[in-house]
């Protein structure tokens, strides 16, 4: 948190063990995995809230949420003051959002940004923008296990029809292969992402010069702060 805060960089965390890392079998097959990524039971929901409260204590302010119910509960806690108002909740691509009505629902549930499925066309992305005011997180490079495509050369038009938006760069074989903290190669991946980001900036500047690209430390980013909150999930009810 201190490193990111000092550099003026956003830091987004996925709280608690997700269903992809848990022992449940519902994510073990191609068909069942389509509905297997929500947090399990009230205990699972409390674990997510506890994890987020602890991370807030450490100074983090941005979280990727994979469950619509948890998004609603976390937003209620934020509205009640149990979670600071500057905490950002991003709705994950695992929610499977693919149309304007779904985007509106996520906005109503409290999402500050949302990540639709990665294969939407430009007109479909534009329709999302017309439905909601919150920023859209758009995959321009995605894992091989999710299709493995690269949409870097569409980024100028994506920015034009979707702004405000963020571009997500996630190349590689799969989620589980890349984001295990004990794995190797993450440093090289981070450097490659920076190269991709530099290329995207050049593409947007060259092909949509009137567009505005955020600077380092932009006010809309979930940049970590010095944490001080000491709240536990069993101190409140929803």
Image (cartoon, grey):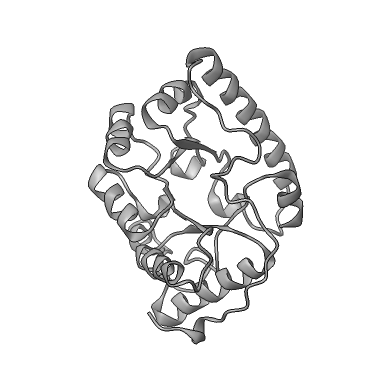
52 or 120, which is in the foreground? 52
Quadrant showing the N terminus = bottom right
Question: Can you say whether 67 is above or below 8 in the image?
Answer: below
Question: Can you say whether 18 is above or below 126 in the image?
Answer: below
> Image point 51% across, 81% down: which residue?
233
191 relative position to 75: left or right: right
Rendered location of residue 220, percent (x, y): 54, 44
Q: Quadrant of residue 7?
A: top right
> Image point 41% across, 22% down: which residue?
157
Please identify the residue farthest to the bottom as the structure is shown. Answer: 234
Quadrant showing the C terminus = bottom left
> Image point 43% across, 60% down: which residue?
66
24 or 49, which is in the foreground? 49
Question: Can you say whether 11 is above or below 158 in the image?
Answer: below
Rendered location of residue 128, percent (x, y): 30, 38
160 relative position to 12: left or right: left
190 relative position to 96: left or right: right
Rendered location of residue 23, percent (x, y): 50, 74
Q: Quadrant of residue 219?
A: top right
Rendered location of residue 126, percent (x, y): 31, 31
> Image point 57% across, 33% down: which residue?
214
> What count of labels does the image hold?
0
């Amino acid at each position: 948190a201190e490193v990111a805060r000092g550099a003026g960089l956003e830091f987004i965390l996925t709280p608690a063990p997700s269903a992809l890392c848990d022992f449940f079998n519902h994510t073990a097959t191609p068909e069942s995995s389509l509905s297997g990524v929500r947090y399990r039971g009230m205990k699972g929901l409390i674990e997510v809230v506890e994890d987020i409260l602890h991370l807030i204590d450490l100074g983090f302010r941005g979280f990727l949420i994979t469950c619509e119910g948890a998004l609603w509960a976390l937003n209620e806690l934020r509205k009640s003051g149990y979670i600071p108002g500057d905490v950002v909740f991003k709705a994950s691509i695992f929610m499977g959002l693919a149309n304007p009505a779904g985007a509106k629902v996520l906005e109503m549930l409290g999402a500050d940004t949302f990540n639709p499925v990665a294969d939407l066309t430009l007109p479909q992305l534009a329709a999302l923008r017309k439905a909601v005011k919150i920023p859209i997180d758009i995959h321009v490079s995605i894992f091989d296990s999710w299709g493995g495509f690269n949409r870097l050369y569409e980024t100028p038009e994506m920015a034009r029809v979707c702004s405000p938006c963020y571009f997500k760069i996630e190349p590689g074989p799969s989620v589980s292969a890349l984001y295990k903290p004990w794995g190797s190669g993450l440093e090289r991946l981070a450097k490659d992402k920076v190269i991709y980001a530099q290329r995207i900036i050049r593409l947007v500047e060259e092909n949509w010069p009137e567009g505005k690209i955020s600077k380092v430390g932009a006010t809309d980013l979930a940049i970590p702060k010095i944490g001080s909150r000491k709240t536990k999930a069993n101190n409140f009810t929803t």
